[in-house]
Image: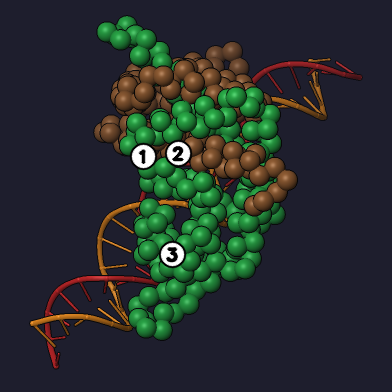
Chain colours: A brown, B green, C orange, D red
DNA sequence: GTGCAAACATTGCATACTGCAATGGAAGCA
DNA sequence: TGCTTCCATTGCAGTATGCAATGTTTGCAC
């Protein structure tokens, strides 16, 4: 552990630990807000609903691509969510190969409920944080993300999506 | 969306977006470092290996508890990792009900490989970050985690574990 | 305009993760 | 000795996941 740049390695360790802890908090918040509703959704199902809610109607391939899963996986998830009344299937009138998928009112309602719970809990946490840390934290995190070459995520869409094979 | 404290909500939104993006980076790093090795491990399997590697021999119930999964789930994961030669099963000589589980040399080797890859990639990212942001980021993230009431994670053990039902 | 290639949804098959509910063996205790 | 408790294991079920067909529909080239 004592390489040529020990302080860089230590900084990396500290930073990873810090981001991971914060990440765990967010994940726990997400899980709680999902478990709090009565509809018993899984995380991948919720991700699909969010994509359909925010992105509008898509076909199956497009949906699978947005979720970074195989079309067959997306299809079976659509089957379940459709059976649960949260996703609506329609035939594309222009191209009969395509299936148009959209969230139903019930599906959008669930997304709204979970999002609101999440909002509330995050706001509660941030309110308990020293005020002078908030701005620095945002800047530092954005610098980290920029250094990693990631484009910044839209503030409204904190879904946990965009991770190949992750929830 | 225009409540009594709009700027607090905005701050929460920005912060969530920032932490989530950073979180995505780390998760992507984890996924890449796992996919880069030839052994083709799943994330839950890697979590189990890390627990066995860092925590020493345990019985099945203890292992399941540390991973926050059902004992039957842990058992079948042990089956697979055992078949892959990464986990060793032994009978406890003192109590014949117990099964002693430990990582094999191959299992520890895999953990070391993945950890090193992760280390290297994180270090690379941090090196690309403006120096003056690093300290602020660590402090801010720790403040966030404290506000959420989480105990800080050990810098050496950034595994993604400790999430009930999550990978 | 006919035919071939590409796109698309779908299904079959296999694997992994997950939990709940038995089951059976072993240990501890009265 | 017998009852209770602990522990691993197995059966069953549901979800997620990918790869490899399959069949239908479109689009394009000739």
Q: Any mark on residue A46, and which?
A: none
**Secondary element at tag 2:** helix
Whether residue A74 is visible: no
**Local crowd at mark 2 within 10 Å, few (<14), some, or many (≥20)?**
many
Label 2, label 3: how far apart the Cα atoms are? 28 Å
Q: Nearer the viewer, residue B162 or C3?
A: B162
Q: CA distance from mark 1 to mark 3?
A: 29 Å
Q: Are marks 1 and 3 in contact (CB under 8 Å)?
A: no
Residue A149 visible: yes
- Image x and y of residue D1, in percent: 14, 93
Image location of residue B31, percent across then percent down: 60, 42
Chain letter of disc 1?
A: B
Label 3 crowd (10 A; few <14 / some 14-19 / many >=20): some
| Residue B75: numbered disc | 3
Q: Work out how far the residue at label 1 is from the one at label 2, CA to CA, in angstroms.
A: 8 Å
Mark 3, secondary structure of its residue: helix
Judging by the rendered image, the residue that carries numbered circle 2 is A21
Looking at the image, which residue is at 49% across and 73% down? Answer: B89
Do tag 1 and tag 2 residues touch (Cβ < 8 Å)?
yes
Q: Earlier in the sequence, mark 1 or mark 3?
A: 3
Label 1 secondary element: loop
Q: Quadrant of residue A156?
A: top left
Q: Residue at x 66, y 54 (%)?
A: B113
Looking at the rendered image, the quarter that the N terminus of chain B falls into is top left
Q: Nearer the viewer, residue B11 or B137?
A: B137
In the drawing, does residue B81 fall left or right of residue B38? left
Q: Residue at x 39, y 59 (%)?
A: B64
**Parent chain of label 3:** B
Residue to which mark 1 is pinned: B150
Select label 2 or label 3 by which is in front: 2
Using the image, determine if residue A162 lies above or below residue A92. below
């Amino acid at each position: 552990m004592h390489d040529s740049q020990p302080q860089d390695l230590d900084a990396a360790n500290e930073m990873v630990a810090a981001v991971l802890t914060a990440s765990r908090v967010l994940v726990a918040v997400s899980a709680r807000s999902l478990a709090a509703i009565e509809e018993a959704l899984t995380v991948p199902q919720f991700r699909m609903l969010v994509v359909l809610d925010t992105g509008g109607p898509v076909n199956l391939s497009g949906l699978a691509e947005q979720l970074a899963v195989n079309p067959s996986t997306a299809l079976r998830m659509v089957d379940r969510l459709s059976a649960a009344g949260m996703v609506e299937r329609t035939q594309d009138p222009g191209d009969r190969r395509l299936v148009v998928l959209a969230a139903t009112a019930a599906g959008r309602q669930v997304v709204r409920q979970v999002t609101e719970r999440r909002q509330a809990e995050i706001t509660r946490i941030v309110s308990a944080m020293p005020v002078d840390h908030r701005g620095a934290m945002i800047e530092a995190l954005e610098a980290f993300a920029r250094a990693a070459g990631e484009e910044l995520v839209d503030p409204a869409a904190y879904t946990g999506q965009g991770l190949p094979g992750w929830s």
